[in-house]
Structures are given as C-alpha cells and as structure tokens.
Image (cartoon, rainbow, N blue to C red):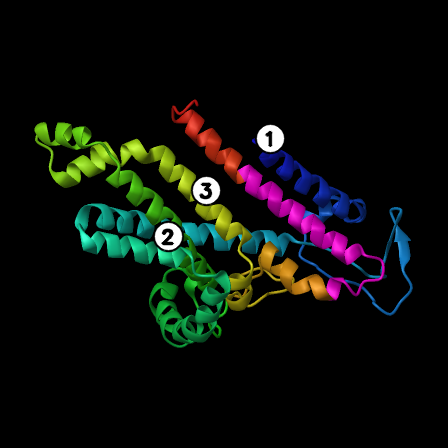
Amino acid sequence: MAALLPLSLLAVAVFLFLSAWPAIQFNGFAFLLHSNWNLGNMYADPVTVHGVQVLPRANYGVWFLIVGTLLTSFLALLFAFPLGVFAAIFLAEGLGGPARTLGSFLIELLAAVPSVVFGLWGYLVLIPALGHTVYPWLADTIGRVLPWFAEPTGSGYGLLTASIVLAIMVVPLITASLRDAIVATPTALREAGMSLGATRMEVLRRVILPGQKRLLVGVSILALGRALGETMAVLMVSGNALNSLPHTIYDPVSTMASFIASQLDSAMQDPTGMAVSALAQIALLLMLISVAVNALARGLLWMSGYRQ
C-alpha cells in the first residue's frame, strides 16, 4: 500500500513523457528558451520535421509560461508567508476559548472554498477595485521610484492580481498548520522560557518558532506547490498573455497550468496531434519544476541540520 504512492507518481511521469515525446523530438531544448507559441497553419497539409508530422509554421516556445508561473507563485508565497505566520500567532496566542475556535474554523473554511469561486470573486470584485483605484495609486507613488510599478496599470488583469488571489488561497495552509503546532507546544517549554525571565512574546520568538523551522519550510513548499499548479483562479484573473513577458507588475501573464486549460480545445483541432503533445510537454515541465522545488526544500533542511 505504501508503494502505491511512489508508483502512482512514476506512472504519471511515464504517461507524460510518452505523451510529450513527439513534441520533445520536434522542439528540443529550444522549447524552453523562446516565447513563440504558434499552432501553425491548420488548413495546410502536415509536413515532416525531425521524423514527426507537424503543421507548417508550427512553433512551440514556453519561456513566457515559465516566467509567468514562477513570478506569480513566488509573489504569492511572498505575500502569504508573513500573513499566514502572523495569523497563526494571533489565533494561537492572541485569542482563547470560543474566539480561537471560531477563528480557526473560518481559516479552515477558507481553505475549503473551490478555486473557481476565488477566481470569480477576483474577476467581479478584485479586478475592478485594483484596476481603478489601487494600481493607479501604486503607479503614482511607488512607480516613481521602482520602474516595475510604473504605468501603464492596465485594466486590473495581470501578474499582481493573480499573485494576490493565489496568496489568499494558500494562506490557510500556512496558518492552520502553524497554529496547530504552536498550540501543541509542550507547556514545559513555555514555562522553562518564562522561568528565565522571558516574556510571552520572547518565548514565542526564541523558543517556539525556532522549533517549527521544519514545519515552516514544509508548509511553504506545500503552499508553493498549490500556487504552481493552480489553474482556474489564475485563468480568470491573469489576463492570459500569449507570447509576451511582463514588463511591469500589472502586465497580463500566463502560467503553465492555466495555459494548458485554455489551449486544450484549440490544440485538439491539430490533426497531427503535435499541439496536444506540446501541452503534455508543458505538463511534464511543470511536474519537474514541482519536484525540483521539493528537492530544494529537502536540501535546505538537510543543510540546516535536519538529517532525517
């Protein structure tokens, strides 16, 4: 039964590799290095390139998807991590009794909301508010110093909006996990710190939180994995840029997961099947990025002294 987990991961990897192999033969490593996704001439006869059939002028480059995926995910984690940590501290240390129970319930309820609901809320509420009010203010203030916040601010769709929605979606993962760990800290540790003259916040900062380093890294990786793979919410608020990189934080972007969902229908019209194979290559790349992120987290833990 335990072997089913790694075997299922291996099965998915093999399936993606076999599905993506024609695209790998056609694209090579150039697939990663340019931003030109073009299905080719749908009305022309297929041609043979590198031993596989493709439509004339077909080209598949995903650099813009890699950049969009990494930027939205890391910005979301940058926003969500401090908010999640402070929310967990407030729930565990600042509230007690029924208030803590209610706050914890609301956080867990937020984690249960489907992603498409977050996307719809972002589309109907967040985009108009940010595009008409917040982004022009940011451009007039921060944009004078940092070019990445300068005008034009656009209509509200884009990198920053997608990152905010993703941050709201992953905050409950960080908050709920850390709150439970703080509450479960043995009373003896708290009393030992206080017996040395430390205040309640000093005990939290110097005794409890340092002991949760491994948990914080773990939940951060879970949150990052959720952000990397999120589809519908990002699809509804990111602007779905094609073949372009963001020059400001307001520019439209596309992520790998949302691009697969948005392009699958048109890719199915390719009689050679190369477009679908290219989408499978994107999925394989996304899986490799997720595995690499987890491996990096394991390496950081190992270097910090957690050898288990």
**Residue 233 among those drawn in magenta:** no
**Residue position marked by numbered label 3 in the rendering:** 221
Crowding at label 3, few (<14), some or many (≥20) Cα neighbours within 10 Å?
A: many
SS at circle 3: helix
Q: 175 above or below 301?
A: below
Give the overall secondary structure of the magenta segment. helix
Residue 122 appears in which quarter of the rendering? bottom left
Q: Residues within 10 Å of mark 1 (few under 14, many from 20)?
A: few
Looking at the image, which residue is at 68% across and 39% down? 11
Percent x, y of residue 232: 55, 62
Distance between mark 3 and mark 2 Cα atoms: 14 Å
Residue at horizontal 56 percent and vertical 38 percent from the top? 292
Q: Position of residue 25 (x, y in %)?
A: 80, 45
Residue at the (38%, 59%) spot, across then down: 110
* Label drawn at residue 3: 1
What distance separates the C-alpha of mark 1 from that of mark 2?
30 Å
**Is residue 268 rendered magenta in the image?**
yes
Residue pointed to by mark 2: 172
Q: Which residues are magenta?
A: 266-292
Mark 1 or 2, closer to the camera: 1
Disc number lying in front (3 or 2):
2
| Viewport quadrant of the N terminus | top right
Choose between 202 and 92: the one closer to the eye: 92
